[in-house]
Amino acid sequence: MKHCLILGAHSDVALAIAHQLAKEGHSLWLAARRFQDLEPIQKDLEIRYGVPVACFAFDAEKPESHQAFVEALPECPDEVYLVFGYLGPHPGSLEHPTDARRIVQVNFAGAVSVLQALALAMQKRGKGAIAGISSVAGERGRKSNFLYGSAKAGLSAYLDGLRNYGYHHGFHVCTVKPGFIRTAMTAGMDLPKPLTASPEQVAKATISGLRKKKGRVYVLPIWRWIMCLIRNIPDSMFRKKQL
Ligand SMILES: NC(=O)c1ccc[n+]([C@@H]2O[C@H](COP(=O)([O-])OP(=O)(O)OC[C@H]3O[C@@H](n4cnc5c(N)ncnc54)[C@H](OP(=O)(O)O)[C@@H]3O)[C@@H](O)[C@H]2O)c1
């Protein structure tokens, strides 16, 4: 039985990961804001799968609390799933500075802050595995979401670098890059069906990618080729597109 920490446990993707891990018989540590609301989820997982589930308060926007959060865990987790993220209503705008800071704080600075403490614990123990949910949005800055995209680009680069560091210190890091996912974040958006994954597909690809020690995982393989094309459009053409 592994101890698996899920950061951002209220998200649809996190719930799908929790169900798959619990089905495999692992113990779960769920971490999220709105800590009290985790209780029904905890009870459901415990009853359904008969595994121990513990809950912890965690806020990505409070980096000063992250070291204490990691020290309060029963022990160093075997696996960490970093799932939280924030798109917000203004991911590509100059007119909402508070929201802009929040996008960077949650998706990049908050993620780095908590992973630094968790990776150090894994380094001291000489083993562990981390899966970080980033996004294909980080592969090229776009007009419509340059704040979210740049924060995810930072997260992807951090996860890639941490993987190279972890290789020499006994732990593995997997960068997960979903395209569209059908979740609360994209509720109301008209998403193209063949390019859109379910939370369960993201969970499956993430867990199996981590177990197979993959470096980067595109949840739907077609996104690897789409992003290859998008990265190679010349700047002079790309800036004219309403993307
Ligand atoms: N949906 C997509 O199309 C898509 C595509 C590519 C990548 N992703 C990434 O996939 C991951 C899961 O997203 P999702 O689609 O499941 O979205 P979601 O349902 O909106 O989940 C995002 C989660 O992040 C949590 N969160 C936001 N700010 C936080 C903070 N300051 N501290 C702690 N937790 C915070 C939210 O917590 P609360 O419940 O407390 O608000 C929420 O549970 C995210 O990293 C997202 O960026 C999503």
Image (spheres, helix red, strand yellow):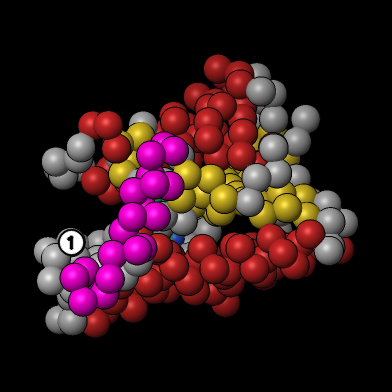
Mark 1 CB within 8 Å of ligand 1 = no
Q: Is residue 235 magenta?
A: yes
Quarter of the figure with residue 180: top left
Q: Which residues, given as a range, are shown in magenta?
A: 220-238
| Label 1: element kind | loop
- Position of residue 72 in the picture relative to residue 220 (left or right): right
Please provide percent x and percent y for residue 233: 28, 65
- Position of residue 88 in the picture relative to residue 31 (left or right): left
- Report the residue at 21% width, 69% height from top: 238
Indicate whether 138 appears above or below 48: below
In front of the other: 187 or 214:
214
* Residue marked by disc 1: 243
In front of the other: 132 or 222:
222
Please provide percent x and percent y for residue 118: 70, 61
Indicate whether 8 appears above or below 207: below
Q: Is residue 194 magenta?
A: no
